[in-house]
Amino acid sequence: MSAADFDLAVIGSGPAGLAAAALAASRGLSTVLLDEQPEAGGQIYRAITDTPVRDRRVLGPDYWRGAELLGPLRDSGAVHWPGSTVWSVARPRDEDAAAAAGTSERTLQIGLSRDGAASMLTVRHVLMATGALERPFPIPGWTLPGVLGAGAAQILLKTSGLAPSGRVALAGTGPLLWLLAWQYLRAGVALDVILDTTPRANWRAALPLLPGFLRSPYLGKGAKLLLDVRRKVKVVDNVTALRAVGEGQLAAVVYRRGDEEERSLAADTLLLHHGVVPNLNLANATGCAQQWDEGQRCWRPTTDDWGATSVEGVSLAGDGAGIGGAVAAEQAGRIAALDILRRLGRIDRAERDAAAIPHREGLERALRGRAFLDTLYRPSAAFRVPADDTIVCRCEEITAGAVREAVRLGCSGPNQAKSFLRCGMGPCQGRLCGPTVTEVIAAERGVSPAEVGYYRLRPPVKPITLAELAALPKTEADVNAVQKH
Amino acid sequence: MTQPNQGKANRGEDFDIVVVGGGLVGTALAWGLGQTGQKVAVLDEGDVAVRPSRGNFALVWLQGKGLGMPEYAGWTKAATDSWGGFAETLREQTGVDIAYRRPGGFMPALSDKDLEDRANAMMRLHNQPDMVRYPYEVMDRAALLKEMPFIGPEVVGGTYCPLDGHCNSLRLLRALHSGMERNGVAYRPNHRVERIDPKDDGFRLTTAGGEIRAGKVVLAAGHDSARLAPMVGLEAPVRPQRGHVIVTEKTAPFLRHPTGYVRQTDEGGVMIGDSFEEAGFDTTLQPGVSSAIAARAIRFFPLLAKLNVVRSWAALRVLSPDGFPIYEQSTIMPGAFVVTCHSGVTLASNHALVLAPLIAAGGLTDAFTVFSARRFHVPQAA
């Protein structure tokens, strides 16, 4: 008799989570799929079941592919709990777990919030499919109303069919920026300008990687999309400096092309984007080891070929383990699910390896050309490491200059800087400042971000109310811990 | 671009006094030592370390302390009395406002029995011979309501001491670092100390960041002092005791007074403690323990229920066997000192203003004998 509510909890219902949950459940694991949103799909397939954008040409075939993942999930018998926010994953004290189960079975406890009530869910294995976040793009004025991330704007389009009106500027680099421009054009939204910040030097660095890209499925689609957009929108290349100006509301975007004079463009909306990074907060707070990825210039949790992390019973798949895109995430989800089936004794190693072959081939295909894109669209240092007066931590309004001052006083990493400045202590838990703070400290110290490190996060990784927390079950040891001895 | 304070490899450096430990105890001492004009360095670990000074509750607290060692009550009272001046000195020197307030602190009680136990404990404390005198009151619910209008229906009363206060302990840490820099104190992160050897008239410290030589060495390394003290003929038998703390989102001011369990910070967030677990060096958060302190806090102040929790953590108190500080000078190597306590915030003023000048001048006075670790070797016959 198992003490676990489920064999497997999959956290996140994007492509990795959908594919993994369907495979694991269809092969007999009792599986629960948890996600914050009211519908499955993650960010990439957000609102796939109920988007008001019914004209399929607007969001494009890569979006609608997500619908194909829903049938297998339904048929698999996996339990889907949308509207569930996971705020903690931890191993219970050994003695508590043994007392509850009457066995020595190893379990994990998930702290969950559903419909305003917190609860603990006991499972044997956790697969985190937490996806990606937009890389923070800290320019002067990025906190002004009217400035937002291109990813956030795309979510508004998918969920509500909303698009900005008035004068719209897009700025930055990377595939998502172009995709959003293309989607807006299809939806009939007028765009004033695209300010392309892709550094000139990136082309030279990316060229040796071109052969891989030429064999990639991105090539045809990407080239057509770029041409489409460039035909219809004014594009300014080689933008090297950018700021948003306005009194309490965005009024203009000031930019510099190469080393020319600054120019100003009136704008009502500025959409910023320069790539995505793994959303690692939950893995970090669970204690999973992580590493600096120089190619993608971001931290990612350390995983083996099967998605297993350094924490027993915790696996990771999809963009949360390193950016690979939706199709790669789907395959990585299935590969991780097969390994979990083996770990929980449903299949042996040979069966796992054999079953993984088509998914590994699919993964390899999906990742072709990724190195080229990573190199070409790597944001320049000027946009990753802002000047002194630019705010890096929006929650606590901490500037890059304050971070540099802390380094001068002897802070060697972001955790010390957090103690000095409170940066990263706000409600966003460092999501909007972590990558920047690490890069600023690294640049100031003249060392690699790998040496500087990242925030150590703690649960709850998503805010819950004190009342929810207070209502959780408590063991005798928990209650004793608050009685003064 | 490399900063001098980032402690890159060096050929060895010489100081008059080296403080091992960059927490609140170490930096308060080093700040005070720097005021004397001696050449001082603080050796610290890196970005991730066992750091109780980053996890504390930020009370500057006297009430209830010293049962079993009245000298500790006297020492603590002196610290709370000098804290205001200390905070002002730091503010003038560094511009950092530590937000020290001394409105008096409460220990609210949820049952008559609880209140009676607290009142009795305060009486026993004050009945000790040689006990320092200070004002306190046992208040009923009606009296408490006048001071804290948002208490819950279960609160029956509480004890109150007008000398209790609180501060912003992260800003205290920052002010001490900033003040150290102004006092000429060298701060050396990534310098975990591996060995301490006597050398000539002083010490040679082998560290992760290179060799450091000093005439005097002060161990203020918290938990790590247990490892380091025997290297200089001292002992620091401290153990970790885990405590959970929760912080809520910022909210409108509702609580002027700090309490032992709940306090509203100058920035508007509410800090909620505290718990006591013997769990070694494991700082994993236990959701059940967080839940228990959350539930108790809501019984004290029901309006907290709707607030979002934005952060929580578990930190490790540095506890000696009887819970009191250890202050000691080595007899076999008189240039070595150990300083350890679990009230690094409250005692910061004493460490900076009283202890540091004594260490700089040569040694501890007889008044500190009571704080020696020799008290843990009471002869069997005594």
Image (cartoon, coloured by chain):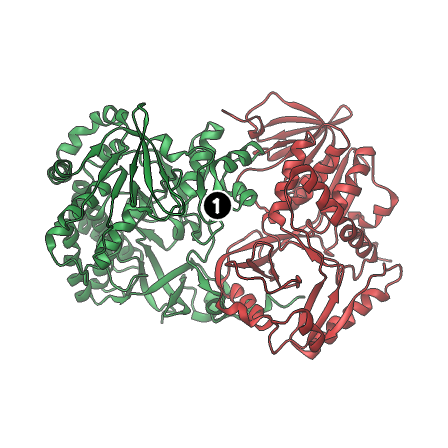
Chain colours: A green, B red
Return the residue nearer the eye: A368 or A249: A249
Return the residue nearer the eye: A253 or A456: A253
Say few, some or many: other residues with alpha carbon within 10 Å of mark 1 (under 14 / 14 to 19 / 20 or more). Answer: some
| Picture quadrant where residue A104 is located | bottom left
Return the residue nearer the eye: A317 or A105: A317
Tell which subunit mark 1 falls on. A
Q: Is residue B372 visible?
A: yes
Residue at 63% in and 42% down: B96
Residue A153 screen position, x and y as percent: 27, 50
| Quarter occupied by the C terminus of chain B | bottom right
Q: Which residue is mark 1?
A: A397
Residue B119 screen position, x and y as percent: 76, 72
| Picture quadrant where residue B321 is located | bottom right
| Picture quadrant where residue A382 is located | top left
Q: Is residue B295 visible?
A: no
Answer above or below: position of B271 versus A187.
below
Answer above or below: position of A177 versus B56.
above
Count of marks, rendered view = 1
Query: Is residue A217 toward the left or the right of residue A452 in the image?
Result: left
Query: Is residue A20 toward the left or the right of residue A436 in the image?
Result: left
**What SS does tag 1 mark?**
loop
Answer above or below: position of A318 versus B108.
above
Query: Is residue A317 toward the left or the right of residue A71 in the image?
Result: right
Query: Is residue A304 toward the left or the right of residue B176 in the image?
Result: left
Residue A289 screen position, x and y as percent: 41, 45
Amino acid type at image mark 1? Glu
